[in-house]
Amino acid sequence: MKNKILTLIAVLCLSLLSNPAKANNPKRSSDSLCLEISGRLLKVKAVEDREYKVELVYNGEIVDSLTLKDKNEFKFNLKKNTVYGIRITKKGYVSRIISIDTSLPQFAKAFFRFQFDTELIETAFSKNLDQDALDFPIALISFNQQMGCFYYSEEYTSNIKRQLYLGEKFLK
């Protein structure tokens, strides 16, 4: 009887160690990766500090970060069915957030890639912009079923830029 209990405990421990629940951590389980997202900054003025920081955020926590020189590309591999944020910060500029939803339909089995370029807004210039709009992500990226790949919401980005620069409210 004692051997059966010990065997049961050993099997239980082994099953817990190989539990797919570990896949909930976006830094683990390469078999659940679905998207390589990469990007770079454009139109950054040459200043003393040429570095910028890119953070991959999941559930309010930073799961990965990179410090790069101006215009160098960053890359992250993302787990499917997860919502991430990419926060880009640079001294003298307003931080920007890009939101990525990696939810996939059942038929989408491939590993996807999405590349984007973005610009940061100088802190001095941002005083002329709609301050509320600066808190919103500049882009929403998700799987576009019609296109069969990841793409950004053109309507959302257009609306947020209009609100930023013209003070127009989002369309209803």
Image: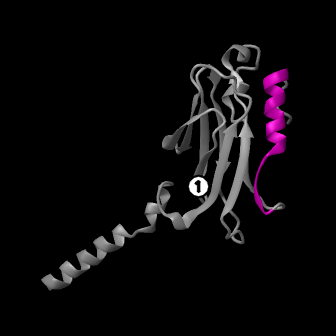
Identify the residue shown where x is 48% and y is 41%.
Answer: 61
Q: Which residue is drawn at 58% across and 19% down?
A: 48
Tell me which residue sits at (79%, 38%) in the image.
157
Per the picture, the main secondary structure of the magenta-coloured stretch is helix
Q: Residues within 10 Å of mark 1 (few under 14, many from 20)?
A: many
Quarter of the image that includes the C terminus: top right
Q: Measured from the top left, where is residue 42 in percent x and y?
A: 73, 33
Residue 19 at x, y percent in the picture:
41, 68
Image check: 168 left or right of 64?
Answer: right
**Residue in view at x 61 percent, y 41 percent:** 86
Numbered disc 1: secondary structure: strand
62 relative position to 109: left or right: left
Does 143 sit left or right of 50 as displayed?
right
Which residues are drawn in magenta? 148-167
For this orientation, the residue located farthest to the left is 2
Indicate the quadrant containing the N terminus: top left, top right, bottom left or bottom right. Answer: bottom left
Residue 96 is covered by the magenta coloring: no
